[in-house]
Image (tube, coloured by chain):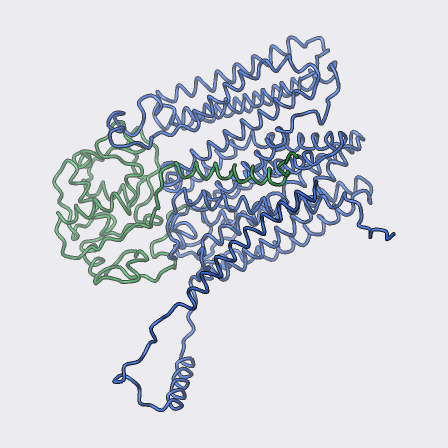
Chain colours: A green, B blue
Amino acid sequence: MTFRVPLLVKLGALVVATTGFYTYVGQMVPQKEVYPPKETLIKADISTAEMVTIGKEIFEGKGLCTTCHTIGKAPPLRFPDLAGVAARAKTREPGMTDVDYFAQTMYEPDAFIVPGFNPGMPTINKPPIALTDQEILCVMAFLQSLGGTPSVTLQTSHKYIGPGAGVAASAAGGGAPSPATQAQPPAGAVAAPPGVPPDTPSKEPAK
Amino acid sequence: MKAMKLKIAVGALLAVLALVATVRVAVYMVGKHEYKEPERIAAGSADATPRQQGLTDEQAAKEKKDAAKPYVEAEYRAFPKIGSRVAIWIVAQLHLLFAAFVLAVPIFALIIEFIGYVTKDKRYDKLAYEFTKLLSVSFSLTATFGAALTFMLIILYPKFTNYMMSVFSPTFLPYVGLFFFEAFFLYTYYYGWGKFSPRIHLLLGLGLNVVGTGIMLIANAWLTFMTSPAGVSEKGAVINLWSAIHNYTWMPINIHRIIANVAFGGSVAGAYAAVKFLQATTDEERAHYDWMGYIGNFVAISAFLPLPFAGYWLAKEIYAFSQTLGLTMMGGAFSWLFIIQAVLIGNLFLGANYYLWLGMGRVPGAGQFQKYIKYLLIVVTLCFMVWATPRSIIATVSEVRAMGGAAHPALGFLGVMSAKNTAVNILILTTFMSFLLYRRTGKTPTVSWAKTGNAVQVGIFAVAAAIVISLGILGYFVEAKVRIGLSVPQVSSVLLAMITITAIDIPLYAKAAMSGEVRWGKIPPISQYVLIFIAVTFTWLMGLMGYVRSGLRQHWHVYGVVRDTSVDAFTPTLGFATKVVSVTVILFFLLIGFVFWLSSLHDKDDWEAEAKP
């Protein structure tokens, strides 16, 4: 007696084997869970050196800067390499200080495009990235450290924020929270109701 | 013999069930009758209140607490065991798969019916009816999963659902109205087959397609708004409903979905024909279902070829809306997903070509073209390998050191867009060439300009391939902003080549001499398994791309407007995502198997009680 595998079993095996193969391929690629960006507590009295450290954390994390920018890599990834940017920022646009230039690149990124690159930098103080004014000051401090001497403090003012705005916001606990900080808000940290549209508006233009 | 097989199958199933039941009962009995130390309250801590008084006080306290309980609007609710995200994911994907099938089949059923009407060939009418038979149960399943999805969204994500309702409430009643008309047209089209004049029936089919497309456009507005919101204020309040509907990704998704639905629907209909072919007991049945499978596959591959171009447009609009979103897709968390996609699409191309090559055997005189197949196979395989080559390679630290970076010194060059764009365009051209060879099998052109026509076609192929390859190489030597623009002439040259070659081929072979009739049904059974493999791969691909479209938002319900603060506000690993996709695909094929079975009942003889002696 010869036993022939029923057609239904063959078809089922084909479906399971095909999906199984694709599942296997899915396990072969790098596995990484991506969590919402962590919030960094910025106290009103932090030093410039501490701002550089925090700025670096934001640069590599919440700010998503490393998605497009490199530091000391040739050729650059998508946007300009930022090694030595502190020196270039002082002369990039006539009549503009490095602080004003850095501020412009983050608050109004399309105002000036580095020659040889496409526009595409998002507005950093608007969602989805939505850095706060003081977080942006910390990133500026970090950028100043790349080939220069950091001078930014939370008292630093520029075209987009008035004098002391960084300190006031930090003391009041401004900024957008992560779910973790909402659950257990640290003293002086950010507090905003979860799940509601963020205070900072959407930057995306209407079509 | 059949009874014996059935007994073996049922016996094996019962044995497994008995084993599971025994283990469960044993575990329960051991847990229940195991000796446990009695719990005793320490004498000193016992409450002195009389029992009845204590119970009354407890009840009063509970009532007081209940009366003072404030109303708190839930933001999220949890789905047991698998969690809300996975539950919604599976139900939404099943809804989309059935909806895609229900929207796609009427498109090509109507075209086939129209061909039958024009040519007066009844075979086409019968084929269109056979496709339509699959619709009614699928429509019910689409509606069921749609209702399940709606209720689950309301239950599990009430705040987000409420927000979407506040934006899109004016579109809901038209959606319901269109759904009613969809049911009207679908059932009239199906049950009215042969009952109306052909023109009226074709009009019913047209109505079904128009209404179905309308439903899809509305639903697409909701989901594309989540990815690329527009028409709302900075705080999320509605400013302009039309802008919210006509957001950046709405029209690209509409076009992409129509094409993808047809490709998917064709492949599933082809799988149905394959199953019927394998079950067939007569040559006549095999011939019919072989032809049906061929048409289903033809529909699927014809729609599949322009699909990457629609995908380019969608990706371009995503970048236009937000560079951050675009970079997350192609250069961030999801970049490796496109390697998995390359494996799937490569398999689809290999499967489609293999099926065409097997199909050449149906026609006498196929040997003339079969000698070219090995070259086509080499090109398809090489393109597949290039497309599936990642830019950076998973390697140990020592391997990375040896390579001088994560990118392989030689293969790394194949992992960039210049190589991949070139590979996919050559892949499309090769598959198109396979189809042309299949079309020519057993035919000899009789027109006086046959040689010239052939030469021109070969020339167009060569020029298109040369443009694609040259631009691909040029891409390595120009800066990024120029390189991005090179994909447009690459795609355009392939499209133009396919259009012009087809335009020449139709009159060239219009009155061709045939070396013999197409022997439908004379194809190896393996070809039918290839059709099923193609359908499973298409379904899996739809699941994967559905995931990236939705997952792209990462920790946002509506990107940049409504943030996800649930426990699932993170992007899972690709490995996890592929497991969910696989579960969904298997569930879909279990259900579509049920649809196939129900459809086949239509052809069975009516049940009659056995005559008693």
Task: Judge left or right: residue B133 versus residue B479.
Answer: right
Instruction: Quadrant for the N terminus of chain B, please.
Output: top right
Q: Relative to the observer, which residue lies in front, B118 or B23?
A: B23
Above-or-below relation of B98 to B394: below
> Residue drawn 51% across and 42% down?
B543
Tell me residue B30's x, y (percent). Answer: 43, 64
Q: Give the side of residue B542 with respect to residue B591, left or right.
A: left
When asked about the image quadrant of residue B59, the answer is: bottom left
Q: How far from the left and from the top, in percent, is residue B105?
A: 66, 40
| Outermost residue to the right | B613
Q: B340 left or right of B402?
A: right
Q: Position of residue A199 (x, y in %)?
A: 34, 57
What residue appears at the point 70 percent right and 12 percent down from the top-left corner? B444
| Residue furthest front as drawn | A1
Q: Quadrant of residue B130?
A: top right
Residue A172, by quadrant, is bottom left
Rendered position, B73 above or below B197: below
| Residue in the image at 23% along x and 50% along y | A135
